[in-house]
Amino acid sequence: MSVFRTRPALRWLVPAAAAVVVIGGGAAAGTIAASADPTLPERSAAQLLVDVQNAKVDGLSGTVVQTADLGLPALPGLTGGGAGGAELMNLVAGSNTARVWYAGQDKVRLALLGTLGETDVIRNGSDVWLWRSSGNTAAHYTLPAQALGGRKQTTLPQGVPSTPQEAADAALAAIDPTTAITTTGAARVAGRDAYELVLTPRDTASLVGQVRLAIDGEKHIPLGVDVYAKDADSPAVRIAFQQVSFETPDPEQFVFNAPPGTEVTEQAAPADAGQAPRSHQGKPSAPPAGTKVVGTGWTSVLVATLPKDDAKTGGKTGAAQLDAVTGALPEVSGAWGSGRLLQSALFSALLTDDGRILVGAVAPEKLYEAAGR
């Protein structure tokens, strides 16, 4: 049950090539037995992976908490100072909370709770609403008829935060001979018994140490995903249900009633609204337009060319903030050229002077290698 669709660039971030769901792992997953609480039957890793892919629930509601501690250096305008900086800081070294309701592909609601207000995304049939308490504004989208059919549609606007299911999808996409699969046995998330699988990159060049998936013992959907940096004792990123119910929510949860004084605007639905990402089993889907991927698996690197006016899109203030952030990064150079480097425990990013950005869950040397191609 993939409910929400992530921003494509983020889908390629950790690991950079994990963009689609695949079933498999071949012999690597075939003989590993996973067992959780004694009341749960023993399941092999291969069986659990198939369970996740075939999981289906008619409805659920719950609270999802995302926490992150990427070990980023202090950067002006990014990791502190001002309301915008505080909100962004939560993404890289803080916590975000969301309430979710699901009653089928055409009835979905997500409420992202922030320190400065609440943002709701509601899908009810052909109607999609995006409401922000800050400013009390609402945008209404009407989905085209072709977006209303099909089992695997993902119709919410891009940029909605991932659920544990989507985070697990990205991790499972990397299962191939480059990944070792083990189990730690029991897990308990949101008061429910779960199996726990551990995915470990075999390539030591990856900054990802392991990904742990907590899979509900009854419903087979991921309840939590932890991403650990190499040699770390605590997760760099965690997305998990804090509370979950599998009762179908009341239909009223998906009816949007604009609060008094709300400014409502009608918006055109995105051209690809309702379409699932194109992919082929066992292969990652094509990266977003204007980007390419160098390498494969956990050590792949996303390469994108920034628009020339990118720094100006936020006006003079936005350009000044971007200059402040990039100016604080250390300068690096090599046969590939010169630029600025951002390093964290889980990923590295290279901004070249010729207008490219390279990102991957790899050490800087891998970025330099990709930049020289």
Image (cartoon, helix red, strand yellow):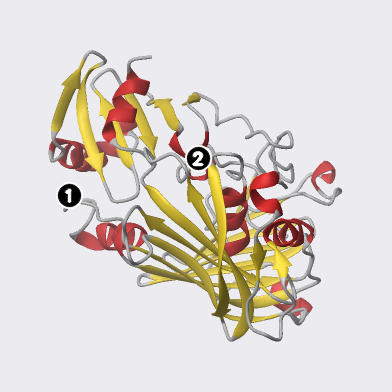
* Mark 1 residue crowding within 10 angstroms, few (<14) / some (14–19) / many (20+): some
Residue at 54%, 49% (x, y): give it.
Answer: 180
3D distance between C-alphas at marks 1 and 2: 23 Å
The mark found on residue 75 in the picture is 1
> Mark 2 sits on what residue?
12
Q: Residue 212 at what x, y percent from top left?
A: 51, 62
Q: Position of residue 223 (x, y in %)?
A: 60, 71
In-front residue for pair 113/371? 371
Is 367 placed above or below 135 here?
Answer: above
**Which numbered disc covers residue 269?**
none
Q: Is residue 287 visible?
A: yes
Camera-nearest residue between 209 and 246: 209
Residue at disc 2, secondary structure = loop
Q: Is residue 153 left or right of residue 89?
A: right
1 vs 2, front mark = 2
Q: Please determine whether, in this image, residue 59 is positioned above or below residue 265.
A: below
> Is 276 on the left-hand or right-hand side of 296?
right
Element type at marker 1?
A: loop
Q: Residue at x 19, y 37 (%)?
A: 326
Q: Residue at x 49, y 57 (%)?
A: 211
